[in-house]
Image (cartoon, rainbow, N blue to C red):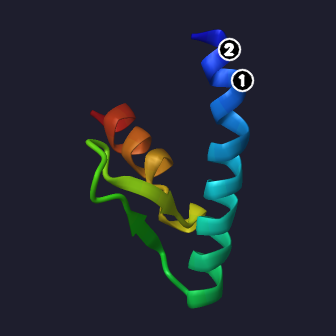
Amino acid sequence: FKKREELVKPIQDKVYSAIKRFAEDKGLDFIFDKGSASGLIFTDARNDKTEDIKAILTKG
């Protein structure tokens, strides 16, 4: 598993960089992967609402 990860990670990083560059060039906020269970490959950081949700949860 470790060896596979070492071999695959550089490829994944290169693909992700290309996707990110494409999204930024086209002004896209999201890119979805039709073949993946998670579905989301890229989102612009401004769409991260983690802190907003944490604040709601903290308030109860």
Instruction: Find out whether the residues at labels 2 and 1 contact each other: C-beta distance under 8 Å.
Output: yes
> Where residue 38 appears, x then y in whole percent?
31, 44
Q: Residue at x 65, y 86 (%)?
A: 25
Residue type highlighted by circle 1: Glu
> Where residue 5 appears, x then y in whole percent?
63, 22
Element class at badge 1: helix
In the picture, the disc for residue 14 is: none
Task: Tell which of 20 and 15 is nearer to you.
Answer: 15
Q: In which quadrant of the rendered view does residue 59 lie?
A: top left
Image position of 8 (left or right of 50): right
> Where residue 16 appears, x then y in whole percent?
62, 56
Q: In which quadrant of the rendered view does residue 22 lie?
A: bottom right
In the picture, the disc for residue 6 is: 1
Task: Tell which of 34 and 31 is nearer to you.
Answer: 34
CA distance separating discs 2 and 1 = 5 Å
Figure check: 4 above or below 60: above
Residue furthest to the bottom in view is 26
> On the rendered image, what quadrant is the N terminus found in?
top right
In the picture, the disc for residue 3 is: 2
Residue type highlighted by circle 2: Lys
Figure check: 32 above or below 54: below
Element class at badge 2: helix
Image position of 58 (left or right of 20): left
